[in-house]
Image: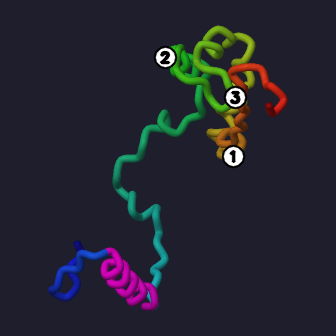
Amino acid sequence: MVRVDGPEIVNHDGKTNALTAYFRSIVRVAGTSVPADLESLYEGRAQPSSNLTAAFTETETKLALLSMNRNSAPGPDGFGPAFYKAAWPTVKEQIMEFMAAFHRGDAQLERINRSHMVLIPKKPWSGGR
């Protein structure tokens, strides 16, 4: 239900028309922007601890990994926490390189979000018969 200037609108088309008209009326109104000095917003206030913005250490990264459920679902690379826990001495350098890139803001996160699906038949393919 949407109430516009008193009457209630309950059907879908009526609500769509009322909301569209409202947003068109406010979007077409030119606004003003005011330059903001973000530093002045925090003047005289406590600043966050430098520990909160420091680079990730190998110790805290390993502790985070060890606290994960080893039977959790695998990540985008197909490996789950059990693999990384078992292979930590071998993979820690690559993980720490990623953690540093993430902290710097130049990690290629779009590659993490990409996935490939492969359909694996449960029984041998019969050649289309």
Q: Let me know if residue 18 appears in the view.
A: yes
On the image, numbered disc 1 is attached to which residue? 110
**Residue 107 in picture, x, y percent from top left:** 69, 42
Residue drawn at point x = 59 percent, y = 29 percent:
56
- Whole-angstrom CA distance, mark 1 to mark 3, is 13 Å
The kind of residue tagged 3 is Asp
Q: Are marks 1 and 3 in contact (CB under 8 Å)?
A: no
Q: Is residue 83 above or below residue 13?
A: above
Residue that numbered label 3 is attached to: 77
Q: Judging from the image, what secondary structure is the residue with disc 1 in?
A: helix
- Which residue occupies the extreme left position in the image? 6
SS class, disc 2? loop
Q: Residue under circle 2?
A: 69
Q: Is residue 107 visible?
A: no
Q: Amino acid at mark 1?
A: Glu
Seen in the picture, residue 98 relative to 28 is either above or below; the reply is above
Q: Residues within 10 Å of mark 3 (few under 14, many from 20)?
A: few
**Which residue is at a point 44% across and 38% down the rendered structure image?**
49
- In the picture, residue 34 is in which quadrant? bottom left
- 99 sits to left or right of 66: right
Residue type (three-letter) at the residue carrying disc 2: Asn
Q: Is residue 26 magenta?
A: yes
Question: Is residue 22 highlighted in magenta?
Answer: yes
Q: Nearer the viewer, mark 1 or mark 3?
A: 3
Color encoding of the figure: rainbow
Q: Quadrant of the N terminus?
A: bottom left
Left or right for 103, reference 23? right
The alpha-carbon separation of the residues under discs 3 and 2 comes to 17 Å
Query: Taking 4 as reference, is 73 left or right?
Result: right
The tag earlier along the polypeptide, 1 or 3, is: 3
Which numbered dot is residue 51? none
